[in-house]
Image: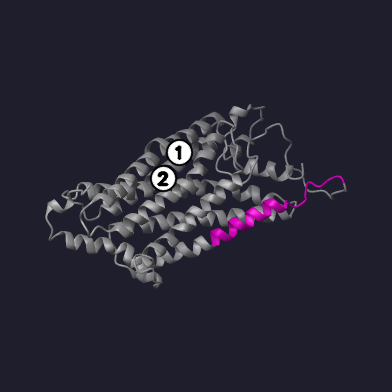
Amino acid sequence: MPSQRRELVRSRTAQPCLLQATNSPSTPTTAGDHVPLPAQHPSMEVNHQSPPPTSPTPTTDGDNSCRMEVTDMAIDGLTLLICLCGLVGNGVVLWLLGFRIRRNPITVYILNLAVADFTFLLFMVTSSLLYLIDNASCSTVGVLKYMRWLFLLSLFSYNMGLYLLTAISIERCVSILCSSIHRPKHLSVVVCALLWALSIAVLAAVTSLCLLYDHERCRMALISMYVLNFLVFAPSMVISSTILIIKVQCSSQQRQPKRLYIVIFLTVLFFLLFALPLSIWNFLQQFSYTSVPSQVVFLLACINSSINPFIYFLVGSCWRHCSLVSLQVAFRRVFEELEDNTACSQDTTMDTLTPAC
């Protein structure tokens, strides 16, 4: 096949456990022994019976193994363009929320979410560039040298984005359902610190099992990580955000921070549509079942990490009057609305929280 060499390289760079496995005699494996990590390109399964990559040789008319794949390069180029736009957008979010807008509980979460998205997009920019270089040349040394660790970095930042969205949804849902409960002043900072620690612990566990032990333990570590995402974080995020938007729409209180809750709902919705397929794809890959090209799911994940700044701006600027305002004013309309609502709610009674429907 024209892209057989590149597919072999991609399959090996997606397997962190191959760093350890290459030092021991290889044995034939079955389809169930494949242990892929996030991979950006198709055909990422391990094939121990395949010969190691050899040095490039001049091609003949019948040998087109080094031929450039136009489709792959087009998708990689589109992914690179979207990631660059996302890096700019998340950089603006980091600047505004970090230096220009007053800090409050929700901006702490959004700031950390922007850091996670920025990190993921940075990984995708680097990997897309490496794959473009690999596609345009016959050398695989650079790709093999860096891609394994870049995959682990993407895994870390991707999980962190899921954890933060879950925390945002639950925190806002609890605050509107149990408004009489006193909220600790630095709760957001503590929760974000714990989530970063959890994400680092998950990454360390997966990395150690995949690099130091056999394929089966690596495979079980990855499956356990995805089960944690699917059974704990994703359902909690969906349920809490659904309750939140329903409660706000049915509430008789007129000063609810609806812009903020619409942002949370849209962010969760786009995560389910664009980012969750990456987890599903990688989970099914542990059982050697993939029906969608990996390039597609990674492109969707890049869209999810890039779209959040545009959601903040559109909700902040197109509310009621649909007038275009500056980025700073739009962000203040969304995120400082929480402070205004909190100040006004101190003068209201508990009866105003009773739902009207």
Residue 269, given in percent of the width and then of the height, sits at 42, 49
- Tell me the residue that label 1 is attached to: 205
Residue 76 in the image: x percent, y percent? 63, 54
What's the mark number on residue 213?
A: none
In this picture, residue 13 sits left or right of residue 283: right
Q: Residue at x 46, y 43 (%)?
A: 203
Question: Where 177 falls versus 310 (above or below)?
Answer: above
**Residue appearing at x 44%, y 54% in the figure:** 116
Residue 102: quarter of image? bottom left
Instruction: Give the residue displayed 56% in from the left and 48% down from the top.
Output: 298
Element class at badge 1 = helix
The reply to whether residue 120 is visible in this rendering is no
**Residue behind mark 2:** 199
Q: Main secondary structure of the magenta part?
A: helix
Residue drawn at x 64%, y 41% as measured from the top left: 12
| Badge 2 element | helix
